[in-house]
Each structure stands twice: as structure tokens, then as C-alpha cells.
Amino acid sequence: MWQRFNERARKVIFYAQEEAAHLGESSVATEHLLLGLVREHDGVAVRVLERLCIPVVQVRNEILRQVVRGNGHMGAEMRLMPNAKQVIDNAFTEAKELDHHYIGTEHILLGLIRDDNGLGGKVLRTLGASHNRARAELAAYNLSHHRHRHAELDQNENLLQSQSPNLRSFLYTLGNVLTRVSSRERMSFTEDDIRELDQHLKPG
């Protein structure tokens, strides 16, 4: 099941297990998934929450205010409770509906909001998150991120084109120097080799 989870989503599950253990539980519930989700600060889910004007600190505080702490008996393996399993199923559904071939933090967030039974979804909806709004903000974030990446690629391409004559010259010289070095018995650089390469690394 976890093969399709990207690195950040897997970290969320790990964090959720830590949060459950810290709260004295032997299994992971939706509130622990949400606590794990807001710990992954660089995940898309947190970006979506920011766009929804829902601070992660507020999410965490609200969960901790309402959560019922366990008795501290931990089993050998931290399993998902049925409501948490449903959230994961929801995340797979969200990814499929969005035509995504991976499970990311954003899908877990949408899966939580979509869940009507667990504390995690209840807290998110209380703080103003709705499924439609979250989907819309995710689409807006993805569009903005795509445009930003496209602009970066254009900038890098222009930079490469502006420097390509010098770059080609340096690579040509480097090839010649490496050929000479490989033909030597000790295969070491001489002062002349270094001086020749250094001429191409100087600006101007």
C-alpha cells in the first residue's frame, strides 16, 4: 500500500506514529495523522492550509485540546485504526480523481477533510477547511508552482545560452586535458594543465 506514497507522505505516517505514542496510544487515529501532517512543514498540505488561512499551530493546538490521551500501553506494531485506514483510502481516491500517480501530503489532507467520523477531519472543518475549498486551493497552488518552475527553467536556459560559447570552449579544453592526463603513466595533472584550465575559469 505504501509504495505509491512519496517521501513526504511516508514521513507523515512516521510522524503520526510518533504522535500517537507520545499521547499514550498504541494505534494511529485521524488526529495523529493530522498532527503528523502539520509537522511536515515543506509538504503541499501545509501550503494548502496556509492558502486556507489555517495556521498549523492552531491545528495542533486544537487537536491537543480535544484529544483523549491513552494509557500508554504500546503494542509491538503501531497499526492504523479503522478511521485512519478510511482516511488513507480517501487519499487514494483523491489521487485517482486528480489523476495523480502518487500519494502526497495533499491527498492525505483531502482524505482527512473528506472523513466525517474522525477528530482530524472535524478539527479541519471547524477551522474553516472544506473539501471544495481545499481542492480549489490545491489547484491554485499547483498552477502557481508550475508557473514558478517554468520561469526558473526559462531563466536557467537563458543563462546557459548566454554563457554557452565560454562553456563549450571550457569543455573542449577540459576534454583535451583529460586525454593528456589519461595517457600519462601516473595520470596526474601538471602545472600547465591547471594553468590552461584556469584560463577558461577566469571571468571576461
Image (cartoon, rainbow, N blue to C red):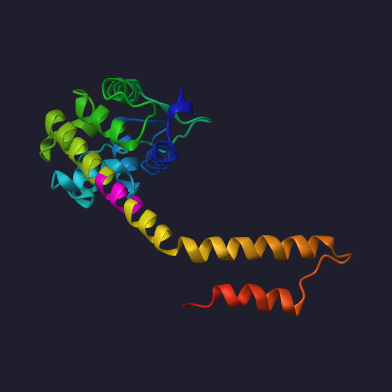
As drawn, 73 above or below 62: above
Reply above or below: 84 against 34.
above
Q: Position of residue 202 (x, y in %)?
A: 53, 78
Which secondary structure is most common in the magenta stretch? helix
Residue 113 lies in the magenta stretch:
no
Residue visible at 16% across and 38% down in the picture: 137
Location of residue 94 by image quarter: top left
| Magenta segment boundaries in residue numbering | 147-153
Question: Which residue appears at 26% of the width and 27% of the height?
Answer: 111
Q: Is residue 176 left or right of residue 183?
A: left
Q: Nearer the viewer, residue 134 or 174?
A: 174
- Does the magenta portion include 148? yes
Of the pair 128 and 131, the residue shown nearer to us: 131
Say whether residue 189 is left or right of residue 51. Answer: right
The picture places residue 169, in percent across and down from the top left corner, at 56, 64
Residue 62 in view (yes/no): no
Image coordinates for residue 148, horizontal then vertical, percent: 27, 50
Q: Residue at x 55, y 73 (%)?
A: 201
Q: Is residue 109 left or right of residue 168?
A: left
